[in-house]
Image (cartoon, rainbow, N blue to C red):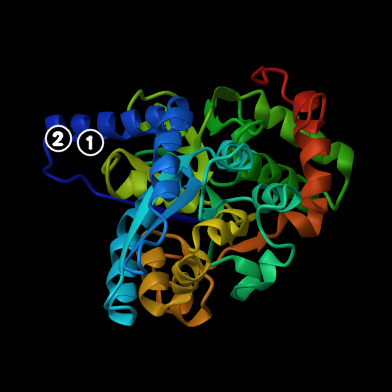
Amino acid sequence: MRNINYSKTSFSYKWLASAVIATASLSLMACSQSANDTADTANNADNSSVSNGQNIELLNVSYDVARDFYKDYNPMFIEHYKSEHPDTNINIKQSHGGSSKQALSVANGLQADVATMNQGSDIELLQKKGLVADNWSEQFPDHAVPFTSTIVFLVRKDNPKGIHDWQDLTKPGVEIVMANPKVTGNGRYAFLGAYGYGLHEFNNDEDKAKGYVKDMLKNVKVYENGGRAATTTYVQRGIGDVLVTFENEANLAASKFGQGQVDIVYPKYSIKSESPVAVVNAVTDKKGTTEPAKEYLDYLWSEPAQQLAADLYLRPSVQSVLEKNSDKLPPVDTFRPNDVFGTWDEIMPKYFGDNGVFDQLATNAPQ
């Protein structure tokens, strides 16, 4: 367990409130208006395929909290691409929302050139629809996972409830905020992280692990419909004692719009979340953008992009870059969900389908 503290700054309350409100607005727009906003973007992308080999536009459909990474990555890639293709202009459009909702949008016709998700099942859905190649995970290093994260706890300043590990989340009076496991990758990783901890703590005793998870879920005050929405609820609205979320999202809250108000707690044992990427060949082959789309994803493994990931508290898949940033990305004992719970095809219906394990254990589960 490691706590990271952030001291107060001299930023004014007015600035902080504005920044948080803006973040909340972005979250609401991404969740509630994704279909309309991204449909317009998709139409623009489809109408602007390569023209005389000089102008290219790519649409990256991605998950909610990845907006911070791609906001900085896109201009970095554009500069790199221009140096490699001086006669070609390239523009990148973004669409963000809950990972699984975004995957469904692409499956239902959103014209994404690339999909950058936070759960393997979301890419697998597109594979089953014939939109990405069957061997998508072999087209890039590290099984097409450029960076990973893990689940940590964001607590109030100085940790007044004494939350140090998973077991502390079952204490009477502790109120938890987390994303909804039924609809978000963030919430699923949080749930599976708790379940995996239970199996690890109780020597793979399923009944005891389920008992722990049931007790933890009794303390959930709010299930939000996205990771960023959960952060906004916890930081801006001041609801809950602990936010269970991704390491990178927790660090963003602690170092920016929640600075001075919160601390980060690392559990001793947690889950590894993977953010797979794929070219949506069904779209790019039609538009003629397959090669630039692949270059866009290839560059995620470059040293500048990997360092950018580390700067935003994502764990680089390039080991040398990860080791260079061990001061802010401390070693954590983690497990892969697929090693413990099976394939995503097995995980999704068993744990998150109607009347699945989550529904059985969460007496206050969202409908």
Residues marked 2 and 1 touching at CB (< 8 Å):
yes
Name the residue tied to disc 2. 15
Residue 263 screen position, x and y as percent: 38, 45
Which residue is nearer to you in this view: 143 or 14?
143
Could you tell me the amino acid type at mark 1?
Ala
Residue 182 screen position, x and y as percent: 67, 31
Callout 2 environment at 10 Å: few (<14), some (14 to 19), or many (20+)?
few
Residue 138 visible to the viewer? yes
- How many numbered discs, if any? 2
Name the residue tied to disc 1. 19
Q: Is residue 2 left or right of residue 196?
A: left
- Is 44 drawn above or below residue 303 in the view shown? above
Which residue is nearer to you in this view: 77 or 195?
77
Q: Is residue 122 left or right of residue 261?
A: right
Residue 362 screen position, x and y as percent: 72, 24
Q: CA distance from mark 2 to mark 1?
A: 6 Å
Residue drawn at point x = 72 percent, y = 18 percent: 363
